Image: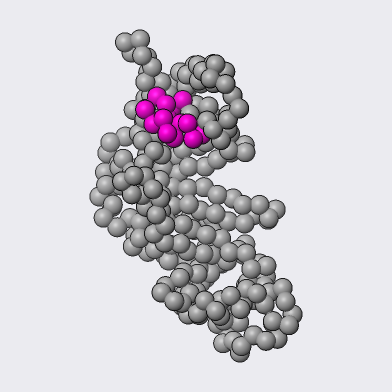
């Protein structure tokens, strides 16, 4: 897997270099809002030199330009056909996140490090995306999953969650089937924490639209998936094939040829 690591300053420089001033200005405002123009210009000059040292800039005709590979990554960050954002609760009760961006005939995994000061970009395949998502949400292997499927209303779902820390509400719970009891015990075991997988698509004006969201329980292994379908929540144990099928249906549809061709270009 090919990786590129950029500091936040280098990332801002890269957006400016490609003419994506809106993205660059947004990052500048967040991380260097109090910095005057003269100091920011100096920071960008330093970033230019550091990108040169990493062989991520070309110098031709007295002009610095991003290498083709980095330029394509920046283009995907500026506008991707689809993005997936992964988020889960860690053992320290903090949030762990990363994302995948789809475009330019490739898939980019985007992770943040050191309080978002360093951004890591890794080119991955669709098969690797499926495996990484399964690992992130601690999905069971095929032989460990079963065919249990539960359908509950939003009201029932809210009742289960609200009863977790309220003894009176636990006694008031409606009679649960064995499958629902299993799911409720998982919620109790994990304090009701649910992790999310968000699929985003973008309009021509780069506005994000949430196409779908899936939730996962927060155990250390063999987690269940929760999906809103119509007025009900569909809850079931899942395995690696569940994730693969989900991605093929909602993410990789009509993109298989595009992603397959990536390997022949680089």
In the rendered image, residue 97 lying in the magenta stretch gets the answer: no
Residue at the location (47% across, 31% down)? 25
In the rendered image, residue 15 lying in the magenta stretch gets the answer: yes
Q: Nearer the viewer, residue 147 or 48?
A: 48
The quadrant in which residue 155 appears is: bottom right
Q: Main SS type for the magenta part?
A: helix
x and y, in percent, of residue 131 in the image: 46, 55
Image-based side of 261 in relation to 88, left or right? left
Q: Is residue 46 visible?
A: no
x and y, in percent, of residue 178 in the image: 58, 85
Residue at the location (36% across, 41% down)? 79
**Farthest-out residue, bottom:** 175
- Which colour style is shown? one colour
Residue at the location (61% across, 27% down)? 34
The quadrant in which residue 16 appears is: top left
The quadrant in which residue 199 appears is: bottom left
Q: Is residue 174 above or below residue 12?
A: below
Q: Quadrant of the C terminus?
A: top left
Q: Is residue 85 above or below residue 213?
A: above
Image-based side of 246 in relation to 217, left or right? left
Q: Is residue 12 above or below residue 145?
A: above
The stretch in magenta equals 13-27
Q: Is residue 171 visible?
A: yes
x and y, in percent, of residue 23 in the image: 44, 35
Residue at the location (62% across, 64% down)? 193
């Amino acid at each position: 897997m090919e990786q590129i690591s950029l500091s936040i300053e280098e990332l801002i420089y890269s957006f400016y270099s490609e003419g994506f001033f809106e993205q660059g200005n947004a990052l500048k405002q967040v991380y260097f809002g109090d910095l005057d123009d003269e100091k920011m210009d100096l920071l960008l000059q330093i970033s230019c030199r550091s990108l040169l040292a990493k062989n991520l800039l070309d110098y031709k005709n007295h002009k610095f330009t991003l290498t083709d590979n980095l330029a394509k990554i920046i283009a995907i960050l500026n506008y991707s056909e689809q993005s997936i954002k992964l988020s889960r609760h860690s053992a320290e009760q903090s949030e762990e996140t990363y994302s995948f961006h789809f475009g330019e005939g490739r898939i980019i995994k985007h992770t943040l490090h050191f309080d978002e000061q360093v951004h890591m970009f890794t080119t991955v395949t669709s098969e690797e995306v499926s495996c990484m998502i399964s690992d992130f949400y601690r999905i069971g292997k095929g032989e460990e999953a079963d065919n249990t499927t539960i359908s509950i209303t939003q009201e029932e779902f809210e009742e289960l969650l609200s009863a977790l820390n309220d003894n009176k509400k636990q006694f008031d719970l409606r009679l649960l089937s064995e499958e629902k009891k299993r799911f409720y015990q998982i919620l109790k075991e994990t304090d009701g924490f649910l992790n999310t997988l968000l699929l985003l698509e973008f309009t021509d004006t780069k506005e994000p639209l949430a196409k779908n969201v899936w939730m996962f329980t927060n155990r250390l292994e063999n987690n269940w998936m929760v999906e809103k379908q119509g007025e009900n929540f569909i809850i079931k144990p899942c395995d690696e094939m569940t994730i693969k099928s989900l991605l093929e249906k909602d993410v990789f549809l009509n993109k298989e040829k595009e992603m397959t061709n990536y390997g022949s270009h680089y």
